Image (cartoon, coloured by chain):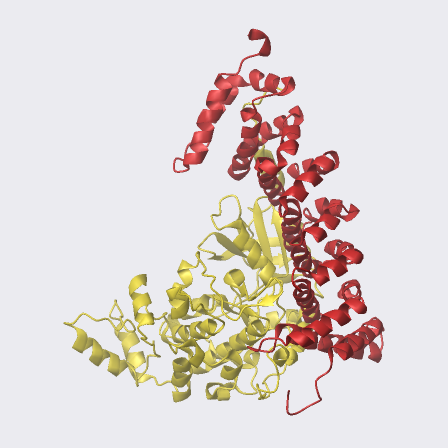
């Protein structure tokens, strides 16, 4: 307890003061200014209570009280909805308070996760946060923590808002696009079974939009999307999705064209998707036709492909395997 | 000086930085306030400066920028720093360009640097106005820092033996203000060195080099000690604290930045970084055995020369004074000058082998070394202390560089018009 100054505020008071201040924050007058200061101050108080001051550990009883008060007062949603009105440092404090409360555990229960499940609006508001430049990165920090919990990842994946990510990852502001891509990737890869089920159930919609990322004008979007595609297809949980993807001749054409892109990085990532088409033991006819039609060219192309990667053993083995497979390709009516 | 005046007058229309910041800090009791809230005063000042620079809207589109000449390189020579003009506002700025196709820096690190830069708003931290992709390049738009880095300053003929003590006091005070803020936010900088301290034409000091910034708050929990060792920071090893170099179970914390402040102080005062002339492994051993670099002046140089002579046969290297070129002018300067005892003491306290004995950034700001700059603004004094170095201010007189434009040509080059697949 500090010897000087006001006596410490109880968690209940903090939450109450914060809520009051937020309700006044959009006012244009002096009261609005004061409210803004009060918001920042109370956020700092809360953060200190949750993380501990300096090297001190936080007091678990106070933390429990604060968490309970936060749930009862629905403070999380309010904070996120008002995030754009809070000042620069306050926004970061909100994210840190949110992330700390989120990881709360009582035995095997995660009370905050349960709380958010009953208020999914919290997640949708966070996802839409990428549309506002001044809060995008703060929302990203909270979203990625949410992704760690399967129940929350599921709500986000199956929401309409998820499809907005195809737009967010392509915005021209690099930091926002990068952050959105990290969240997007996390959602599609973190919980293997959940992700596999989601991709199977929503194959058409997801890959229609994914195609646009692969054709993006933005070099980084294209490169990252291609890399993630390779990872998704090669993950054995996504077997059904992979099979579907490699049965479509348009996808094969796209990858073959990307093999010829000027960018070596894109060529290399495309190789890792292309190899799945060739390695497939049950190639559908349209796929086989394309490969047969380009047999000589492909053998020639792959023989000269990235020959300077001599130290990458796995790549060279795979390349040799592909060349062998393509050489041995036969039209079905020949046997 | 006409160039500078021109800069100052044009600056009025461009509220790039907050000059009305409190010029000194009130001594505060560290005991009564928790570390989070201790920086709230500087937070407020910095937030206002953040909103100031936002008044100019630097949009993420290449056609808004006119690139002039290349003025430097960064990130192991893989990034090009160009002087440029933001056309809509007429502001002179710098753009750092990295070709992502050819760059071997992990893309994640570049992403981390950009995102980390966006986490801070402080008048002594280099702001990132905008970052975007143009063709295969990552462009980062930043303010023009007319004097370049402090590394550039000690490379200037006038200062090869180091900067004047008063200039160093101004520079380090401002860097510590930035560091106090960074530490209060739970980050460790891990890249403090002269080349990451930039000075603008009007004398503002700003810390950069956010690439190795480490957040000690992970997943909603604060770590008191961290064990993350940067694997790609070979060029920064000279500035790193022994506990980082050791990579042992004890880990390290933000006190490692304080050690780097000490090394940087020596770098600024001596003109070269301590241990510069020895192999990295030997430097590591010297640091771990507790060898403390010192400021080279009349009070220390004679000691070293005696030591050197004694050790001639033994072959032990103090590692601190080894002027391979035998520069006699430099030696004379080092013999004659005297740094204040406060400065010597400051360096000594930063370079304590045991991290817990090192002061915090906040402690250091009230160190007696900074008495000489108390209540004085860096902008008002630093440029005069740096004479005869002239800052770079006016971009328009320099040749224009068109290599960045021509996007259509680039796009055409991307499509291989040679052989095609038959679909």
Identify the residue at horizontal 51%, vertical 22% (top origin). Answer: A298
Most extreme residue toward the left is: B313
Residue B407: x and y, percent?
A: 61, 41
Q: Position of residue B127 (x, y in %)?
A: 60, 65
Can I make out residue A135 in this image? no
Which residue appears at 42% of the width and 78% of the height? B350
Please give the count of numbered marks on the rendered protein: 0
Is B86 left, or right, of A13 in this rendering?
Answer: left
Which corner quadrant of the image does residue B205 belong to?
A: bottom right
Which residue: 32% across, 68% down? B275
Residue A58, compared with residue A96, is above or below; it is below
Q: Quadrant of residue B408?
A: top right
Q: Residue placed farthest to the top in the image?
A: A334
Specify the chain shown as yellow. Answer: B
Q: Looking at this view, name the residue that lies furthest to the front.
A: A107
Q: Is residue B160 left or right of residue A182?
A: left
Q: Position of residue A44 (x, y in %)?
A: 68, 75
Q: Which of A251/A2 is in front?
A: A2
Q: Is residue A36 above or below residue A228?
A: below
Residue A212 drawn at (x, y percent): 69, 37
- Depicted A120 relative to depicted A71: above or below: above
Q: Residue pushed farthest bottom?
A: A4
Asked whether the viewer can see residue B322, the reply is yes
Closest to the observer, A66 or B98: A66
Rendered shade, chain A: red
Left of A320 or right of it: where is B302?
Answer: left
Pick the quarter of the image with the C terminus of chain B.
Answer: top right
């Amino acid at each position: 307890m500090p010897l000087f100054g006001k006596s410490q505020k109880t968690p209940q008071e903090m939450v109450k003061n914060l809520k009051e201040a937020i309700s006044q924050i959009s006012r244009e007058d002096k009261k609005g200014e004061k409210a803004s200061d009060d918001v920042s101050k109370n956020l700092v108080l809360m953060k200190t209570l949750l993380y501990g001051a300096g090297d001190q550990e936080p007091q678990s009883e106070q933390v429990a009280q604060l968490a309970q008060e936060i749930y009862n007062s629905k403070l999380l949603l309010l904070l996120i909805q008002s995030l754009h009105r809070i000042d620069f440092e306050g926004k970061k404090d909100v994210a840190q308070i949110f992330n700390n409360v989120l990881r709360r555990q009582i035995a095997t229960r995660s009370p905050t996760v349960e709380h958010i499940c009953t208020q999914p609006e919290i997640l949708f508001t966070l996802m839409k946060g990428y549309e506002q430049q001044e809060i995008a990165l703060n929302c990203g920090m909270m979203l990625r923590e949410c992704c760690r919990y399967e129940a929350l990842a599921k709500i986000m994946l199956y929401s309409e808002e998820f499809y907005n990510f195809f737009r967010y990852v392509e915005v021209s502001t690099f930091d926002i696009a990068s952050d959105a891509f990290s969240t997007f990737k996390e959602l599609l890869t973190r919980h293997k079974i959940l992700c596999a089920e989601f991709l199977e159930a929503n194959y058409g919609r997801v890959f229609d939009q994914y195609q646009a990322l692969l054709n993006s004008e933005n070099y980084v979007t294209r490169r990252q999307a291609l890399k993630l595609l390779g990872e998704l297809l090669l993950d054995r949980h996504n077997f059904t999705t992979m099979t579907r993807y490699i049965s479509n001749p348009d996808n094969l054409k796209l990858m073959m064209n990307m093999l010829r892109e000027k960018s070596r990085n894109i060529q290399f990532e495309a190789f890792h998707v292309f190899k799945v088409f060739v390695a497939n033991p049950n190639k559908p006819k349209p796929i086989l036709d394309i490969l047969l039609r380009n047999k000589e060219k492909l053998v020639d192309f792959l023989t000269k492909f990235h020959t300077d990667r001599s130290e990458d053993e796995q790549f060279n083995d795979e390349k040799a395997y592909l060349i062998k497979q393509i050489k041995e390709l036969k039209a079905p009516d020949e046997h | 000086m006409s160039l500078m005046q021109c800069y100052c007058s044009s600056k009025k229309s461009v509220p790039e930085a907050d000059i009305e910041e409190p010029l000194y800090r009130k001594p505060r009791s560290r005991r009564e306030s928790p570390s989070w809230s201790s920086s709230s005063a500087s937070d407020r000042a910095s937030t206002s400066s953040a909103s100031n620079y936002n008044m100019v809207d630097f949009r993420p589109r290449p056609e808004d920028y006119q690139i002039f000449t290349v003025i430097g390189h960064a990130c192991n020579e893989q990034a090009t720093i160009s002087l440029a003009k933001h056309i809509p506002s007429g502001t002179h700025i710098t753009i750092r360009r990295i070709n992502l196709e050819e760059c071997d820096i992990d893309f994640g690190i570049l992403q981390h640097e950009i995102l980390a830069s966006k986490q801070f708003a402080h008048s002594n931290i280099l702001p990132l106005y905008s970052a975007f992709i143009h063709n295969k390049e990552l462009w980062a738009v930043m303010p023009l820092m007319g004097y370049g880095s402090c590394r550039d300053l000690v490379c200037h003929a006038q200062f090869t033996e180091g900067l004047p003590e008063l200039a160093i006091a101004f520079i380090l005070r401002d860097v510590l203000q930035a560091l106090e803020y960074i530490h209060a936010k739970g980050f460790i900088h891990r890249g403090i060195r002269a080349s990451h301290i930039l000075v603008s034409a009007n004398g503002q000091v700003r810390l950069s080099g956010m690439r190795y910034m480490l957040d000690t708050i992970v997943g909603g929990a604060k770590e008191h000690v961290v064990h993350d060792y940067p694997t790609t920071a070979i060029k920064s090893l000279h500035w790193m604290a022994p506990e980082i170099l050791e990579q042992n179970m004890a880990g390290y914390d933000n006190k490692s930045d304080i050690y780097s402040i000490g090394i940087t102080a020596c770098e600024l005062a001596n003109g070269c970084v301590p241990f510069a002339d020895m192999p990295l492994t030997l430097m590591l051993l010297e640091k771990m055995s507790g060898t403390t670099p010192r400021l080279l002046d009349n009070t220390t140089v004679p000691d070293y020369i005696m030591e050197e002579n004694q050790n001639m046969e033994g072959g032990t290297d103090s590692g601190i004074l080894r002027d391979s070129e035998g520069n006699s002018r430099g030696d004379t300067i080092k013999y004659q000058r005297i740094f204040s005892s406060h400065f010597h003491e400051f360096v000594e306290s930063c370079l304590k082998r045991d991290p817990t004995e090192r002061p915090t950034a906040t402690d250091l700001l009230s160190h007696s070394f900074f008495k000489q700059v108390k209540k004085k603004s860096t902008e008002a004094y630093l440029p005069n202390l740096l004479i005869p170095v002239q800052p770079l201010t006016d971009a328009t007189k320099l040749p224009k560089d068109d290599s960045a434009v021509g996007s259509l040509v680039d796009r055409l080059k991307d499509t291989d018009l040679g052989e095609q697949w038959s679909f």
